Amino acid sequence: VDPLRRLAQLDGVVLDLTRREFDLLAFLAARPGVVVPRKELLAEVWQLSYGDDQTIDVHLSWLRRKLGETAARPRYLHTLRGVGVKLEPPQGEGGPA
């Protein structure tokens, strides 16, 4: 993830992300392996002090699809139910760059 150029690549292929998808990925990528609470995502990515968790779920779903994963079989985006989300590269892989 290159926040200055607003560019994200996976396996050398540029990902076609919306502004919010990129913001979400960049925020999580800046904190690899750290579980980010949903309230923090709403505050930092959406600039909201409160909101609907469904907003996060929808954007995570779209982002997962573009990363070639599902919630049931995550590779990069891992949801900890009731806690938050973390971005981790799969074992032996570099992950999104």
Image (spheres, grey):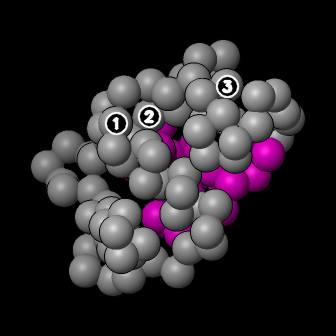
Marks 2/1: CA distance? Answer: 8 Å
Secondary structure beneath label 2: strand
Query: Which tag is nearer the camera, tag 2 or tag 3?
Result: 3
Residue that badge 2 annotates: 86
Q: Is residue 63 found inside the magenta-colored segment of the image? A: yes
Segment tinted magenta in the rendering: 55-78
Q: Residue at x 52, y 32 (%)?
A: 85
Q: Are marks 1 and 3 in contact (CB under 8 Å)?
A: no
Q: Earlier in the sequence, mark 2 or mark 1?
A: 1
Residue that badge 3 annotates: 39
Q: Earlier in the sequence, mark 2 or mark 3?
A: 3
Residue 57, can we see it? no
Q: Relative to residue 77, is residue 51 drawn left or right? A: right
Q: Residue at x 20, y 43 (%)?
A: 91
Q: Quadrant of residue 57?
A: top right
Q: Amino acid at mark 2?
A: Lys
Residue that badge 1 annotates: 31
Q: Quadrant of the C terminus?
A: bottom left
Q: Is residue 21 found inside the magenta-colored segment of the image? A: no
Q: Are marks 2 and 1 in contact (CB under 8 Å)?
A: yes
Q: Residues within 10 Å of mark 1 (few under 14, many from 20)?
A: few
Residue 80 is situated, as x and y percent measured from the top left of the image, at 54, 23
Q: Amino acid at mark 3?
A: Lys
Q: Relative to residue 38, is residue 55 drawn left or right? A: right
Q: Residue at x 79, y 46 (%)?
A: 55
The circle drawn on residue 11 is: none
Marks 2/3: CA distance? Answer: 14 Å
Q: Nearer the viewer, residue 22 or 94?
A: 22
